[in-house]
Amino acid sequence: MTSDQKGIVLVVIGMVLFSVQDALIKNLSTHASLIQIFVCRGVIGIVILSIFLKLTNRKLSIKSNNPKIAITRGLLFPFAFLCFYLAIAAMPIAEASALFFVSPFFMTILSKIILKNKVGIHRLVAIMVGFVGIIFIIKPEFTNFNWVMILPIVCAFAYSLSMILTIYTKDSDTTYQQTSHVYLGSIVVGTIVYLVFGNFNEHYSDNPSLSYLLRDWDFTDFTILFKILIISFIGTIGILCLINAYRIGLPSVVSPFEYTMIINALIIGYFIFHEQPDYYSIIGMTLIILSGIYIFFRERPRKTKIVSDNSFRV
């Protein structure tokens, strides 16, 4: 397998894990605090990562040779998904995901501007086909627009930029360092939001997103705490997959495979929430799969590796 193909596989695995995580986070939006989830996930993630490294005779170091880039990326990533989780509390998760998936467009543009990567017409067409597939699945209605719909787009841009910055630290920072930066960033972002909005009461807001943000923390409900633990565990594995994917593959090649998250959402909806896709959704799934397979096999004969296999650092 080429470096790009390995990156594609890791993205697909990461999307499965993130789909399960998002379902749990949306489930908690009616009775838990998003900031509590954010801070606890950061703390638990660091603990899980430290235990894993200890068991494998490795040492966790958060120090970076590119501290400014590491800090920026570490704050961008959690900020991005804070926006996304606020969005799914007030709108269908499928529509929020559709809006988030403008990220491949941001990724392609940023990789061209920042990394000077070549982006051919074939990749652009494949990305466009994948996006058309998403529209078929989501069938969004923008007649009743509200500000919450902006949040997934903000998430997409911040997320894309954080992934591009991953490339700049891939040779100096290990995967585990980069993951620890994300979790420390979650703690910092969550703490800042709590200090700014902690004095507000959720009952002052009729908006589900703001209620999720302002709700009091609860350490007495063990169901909530258990779900946060599961979210933290699968989130850690998902982040590791995603970071490694962008370390070894071209962003403009691997990013379209994040579309598979929509398919995951449909599967989860069908088997867990008894939601059956219509014909338009089936057409959309087919377009997404075909565009992804096209890029995968188009990259297969490439002989030049952008990043050597040694960059899969641990």
Image (cartoon, helix red, strand yellow):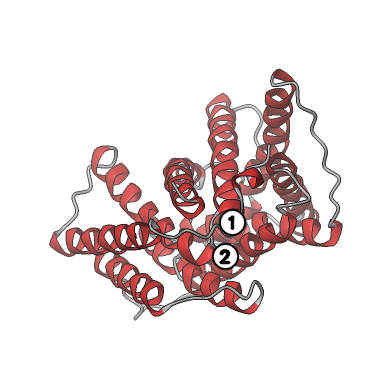
Q: Residue at x 63, y 54 (%)?
A: 213
Q: Quadrant of the C terminus?
A: top right
Query: Circle 1 sits in a helix, a strand or a loop, which is it?
Result: helix
Q: What residue is shown at x 43% (from left), y 56% (from top)?
A: 258
> Residue 136's image quarter?
bottom left
Q: Amino acid at mark 2?
A: Cys
Q: Amino acid at mark 1?
A: Phe
Residue positioned most to the top:
55
Query: Is the C-beta separation of discs 1 and 2 under 8 Å?
Result: yes
Crowding at mark 1 (Cα within 10 Å: few <14, some 14-19, many 20+): many
**Residue 289 in picture, x, y percent from top left:** 27, 57
N-term-proximal mark, 1 vs 2: 1
Q: Residue furthest front?
A: 303
Q: Report the side of 239 relative to 98 (left or right).
A: right
The residue located at (69%, 31%) in the rendering is 49
Residue closer to the observer: 163 or 148: 163
Residue 149 placement (x, y as % from top left): 47, 71
Task: Name which residue lies at 24% across and 64% down.
Answer: 287
Q: Is residue 241 above or below residue 211?
A: above
Q: Percent from the top left, x then y, of residue 237?
A: 56, 37
For disc 2, the marked residue is 155
Q: SS for tag 2?
A: helix
Quarter of image, res 113:
bottom right
Percent position (x, y) of residue 282?
18, 58
Q: Which residue is mark 1?
A: 81
Q: Residues within 10 Å of mark 2 (few under 14, many from 20)?
A: many
Marks 1/2: CA–CA distance:
6 Å
